[in-house]
Image (cartoon, grey):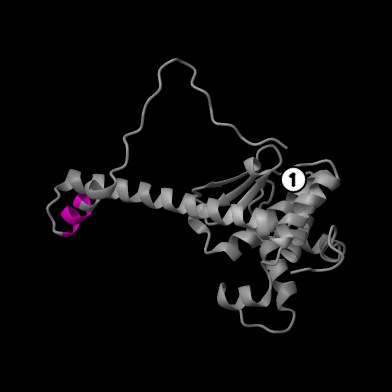
Amino acid sequence: MSASSSPESTSGNTTELPKLPHGFEWLKLVASHYTGALDENGEQHYNRVLAERQREASCKRCEKYRDWNLKYSPTVIFMREQIERIGGQVGREHIICDHCDEYKAGGFNPSLGVLLCQNHMANRLHLEDTLAHELIHAYDEMKFHVDWTNLKHHACSEIRASNLSGECRMTNEIFRRGQFKVTRQHQECVRRRAVLSVMGNPNCKDEEMAKKAVAQVWDSCFNDTRPFDEIYR
């Protein structure tokens, strides 16, 4: 697996982006905004700068959480080791933080690596669950040669990722998603999240098709805990 690289300039000319105001320059702009001293153009400039500063801050936070989990998370460390055992590699350079317009926490691309959506990452534990989820997809890609255009293949990997990553633990369901069911909570969470993910597949026409694909592979894929001996988290 290779990481995506920055596009190289096709000519000798490069366009430099304007630097963000920092320090007293930024404080002056903020004060002008709150005192109503900015005209329409000034407000537009303030909003652009604010959005860029927030994006910069969320990127730094995401990268900090990512690096911590790469070093200390037992699940993340274990999954990367297992991927290496079957001939793959997901290095730090293959795991990028970026702004996502879609409301999702992350994604996996067999050619590019793992995406962590910095603007939708609640905290370090949320990133750990998300990274574990995507690493299970990476493991499945290496181990089983998943055909991601095949809805049953996609459904199986989504079932496994939600089942094994920890994102469906009861505390997440209660405090993050407001789901208060006690019986079969874990199974319902895994099924719900797998269906939602399969619905995003271009070859999936509707929710019923996604539900059918998940149902067809449910028993075998839910009970397949490889590379774990059992549901760890």
Camera-side residue of 58 and 145:
58
In the orientation shown, which residue stands out farthest toward the left? 37
Q: Is residue 34 left or right of residue 19?
A: left
The quadrant of the image that shows the C terminus is bottom right
Rendered image quadrant of residue 133: bottom right
Amino acid marked by disc 1:
Trp
Q: Position of residue 61 (x, y in %)?
A: 49, 55
Whether residue 76 is visible here, answered yes or no, is yes
Whether residue 207 is visible here, answered yes or no, is no
Q: Position of residue 103 (x, y in %)?
A: 52, 56
At x 52% / y 23%, what residue is drawn? 8
At x 22% / y 54%, what residue is drawn? 30
Which residue, given by chain and number where applicable, does mark 1 sit on?
148
Magenta: main secondary structure: helix
Q: Is residue 191 magenta?
A: no
Q: In the picture shown, does residue 13 fall above or below 69?
A: above
Q: Is residue 32 left or right of residue 81?
A: left
SS at mark 1 in the image: loop
Camera-side residue of 214 and 45:
45
Rendered image quadrant of residue 196: bottom right
The quadrant of the image that shows the N terminus is top right
At x 63% / y 77%, what residue is drawn? 171
Q: Is residue 22 left or right of residue 102?
A: left
Q: Position of residue 91 (x, y in %)?
A: 69, 43
In the orientation shown, which residue stands out farthest toward the top? 12
Camera-side residue of 24 and 164:
24
Please provide the residue range marked out in magenta. Answer: 28-34
